[in-house]
Image: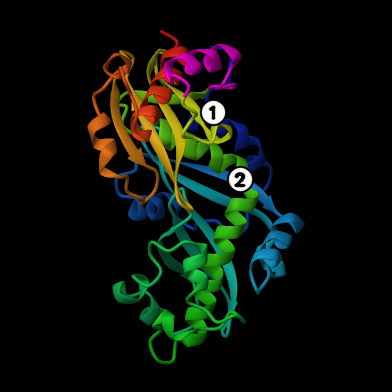
Amino acid sequence: MKHLIFSLAALTAVVSTAAAQSEAFCALRDPVRQIYLIYPGADAHRSIVRSVGPKARHEVASQLPFGLHFNELGKHTLYVAAKSGRPMGLIHVRSEVGRWGLMEIAWALDLDLRVRDFTFQRCRSRQRKKLSTKAFRANLIGKNLSELGALLTKSGKSSSALKAPRGTEGLAAALVRSAMKTIVVTESVWKADLRILRLLDQGLRGFEGGASVQPVKQVYTQDVLHELRDRLAGNGSVFDRATVAVLRVINKDKKQIGIVVRTDWLVGAKKTVILWRIDMSGKLLAINAAGAETLPSEFKALKGRALGSFEDCASPTELAAVEVLTLSELHAKR
């Protein structure tokens, strides 16, 4: 296969030289113990070292009412926990200025950059124990950037929504600011790495034996468009075709074992990303929404169907399935 193939091992090879050249700031002090404590199901981890510089500082300043201080610049490490070659989640350590000096917080994030958990790696405040409880951590776990922002005032101070124990308001606000900066910095500095990790997760999920994914470079070729015109019988696409991606799932023997088609589904102003998994016989194995979204019940009836079962497709979900299965058939390498 001549086109680019993504795997966790290949991603590590890209960054290993950079990692060896310079010791990163704000790294985990005991990576092996901490990573597997946060991700107990993991069987491997990788470290990706990148430089946090002026571009990241600009991104933070443009999105948040507070910025990065000097200690937050330099080389930093993003840790990736994995199981059977599939990325499970991220850990990123960031420093933050507190009342009692500089503190370090290890943030666990999912691949969509929502908070999974956090731990104080360094903090001199006695109030840290009150913020390490399960009850308080529940205020942050599962939240994305905008949801975290709703816990602070416009100036970045603690609000009543944060539910910080009495006396911890300042430390709690600093903690949330750290989480928000961590998310913005991770998206900015590790943007290309995150794309690969997300493709790996989306491609390998649901395919036992998958080791890597191969993105199709050009999804809608002239041949594909011609075939779709016939099969959709004059109906237009229900997708924004500019956002559609096709991934070939490859096993360790370099053989293709399935296809994943990533599309969007627009209902009103709400867009849901859908992952369609197809086996090598052309049958729909699963249709799932990416992230925490749920799909309409009509999608359940599509599971197990193949192209031959759609004769007079009229509903939007059936038209969607025909387009996805056509893409799978024409881009599969059997």
**Horizontally, is 99 left or right of 42 in the view?**
right
| Amino acid on which the number 1 mark rests in the picture | Ala
Tell whether label 2 touches label 1 (CB within 8 Å). Answer: no
Q: What stretch is highlighted in magenta?
A: 216-234
Residue 72: where, in percent of width, then height? 66, 64
Please tell me which residue lies in front, 140 or 120: 140
Q: What element carries label 1?
A: helix
The quadrant where residue 99 appears: bottom right
Choose top left, top right, bottom left or bottom right for residue 286. Answer: top left
Comes first in the chain, label 1 or label 2? 1
The quarter of the image holding the C terminus is top left
**Mark 1 highlights which residue?**
10
**Residue 255: percent from left, percent from top:** 40, 12
Alpha-carbon neighbours of circle 1 within 10 Å: few (<14), some, or many (≥20)?
Answer: few
Confirm whether the magenta stretch covers residue 189. no
Which is closer to the viewer, label 1 or label 2?
2
Residue at 41%, 14% in the rendered image: 329
Q: In this view, does 103 lie above or below 184?
A: below
Magenta highlight on residue 219: yes
